[in-house]
Image: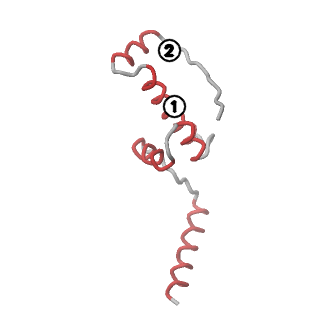
């Protein structure tokens, strides 16, 4: 799979602070991609699958990462919640028969 590369500019003092904490090279790149993916998912600009692809990790690991950040994976409005509850109640009744 081909990829597109992009660059970001960091102020020297920000880079110095990051590198002093071990965030250089691949570690910095991975951290950046993880948080970029989470932010874009939070803003609903990327789906869960595309965000985990950007992050470079599996979907379940990405879900765990989102949980650590307090980012909800499922964000239903009231109508969607009502439909889900109704479907669950219907399935429960069908299973009892």
The image position of residue 93, as x and y in percent, is 53, 84
- What is the x, y in percent for residue 44? 61, 43
Q: In which quarter of the image is the N terminus?
A: top right
Dot 2 falls on a residue whose secondary structure is: loop
Question: Circle 1 — which element?
Answer: helix
Q: Which residue is drawn at 45% across and 46% down?
A: 61
* Residue at the disc numbered 1: 33
Q: Nearer the viewer, residue 79 or 9?
A: 9
| Residue 41 falls in image quadrant | top right
In this view, which residue lies farthest toward the top?
12
Count neighbours of disc 1 (C-alpha within 10 A) and say few if under 14, some if 14 to 19, many if 20 or more.
Answer: some
Quarter of the figure with residue 4: top right
Determine the CA span between mark 1 and mark 2: 15 Å
In the image, is 21 to the left or to the right of 70? Answer: left
Residue drawn at (57%, 61%) of the image: 78
Q: Which mark is residue 10?
A: 2
In the image: residue 12, left or right of residue 44: left
Tag on residue 78? none
Location of residue 9 by image quarter: top right
Q: Which colour assignment does the render follow?
A: secondary structure
Which residue occupies 56% across, 79% down?
90
Mark 1 or mark 2: which is in front?
1
Q: Of the two numbered discs 1 and 2 on the same chain, state the one appearing first in sequence.
A: 2
Left or right, 9 with respect to 67, comes to: right
| Badge count | 2
Q: Residue furthest bottom?
A: 97
Q: Where is residue 91 in the image (x, y as percent from the top left)?
A: 55, 78
Q: Residue at 56% of width from left, 36% of height from top?
A: 54
The residue lying toward the viewer, choosing from 66 and 84, is 66
């Amino acid at each position: 799979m081909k990829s597109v590369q992009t660059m970001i500019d960091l102020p020297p003092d920000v880079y110095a602070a990051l590198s002093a904490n071990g965030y250089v090279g691949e570690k910095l790149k991975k951290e950046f991609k993880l948080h970029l993916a989470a932010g874009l998912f939070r803003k609903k600009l990327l789906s869960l699958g595309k965000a985990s692809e950007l992050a470079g990790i599996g979907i379940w690991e990405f879900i765990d990462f989102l949980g650590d950040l307090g980012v909800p994976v499922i964000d239903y409005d009231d109508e969607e919640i009502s439909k889900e509850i109704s479907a669950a109640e219907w399935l429960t009744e069908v299973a009892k028969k």
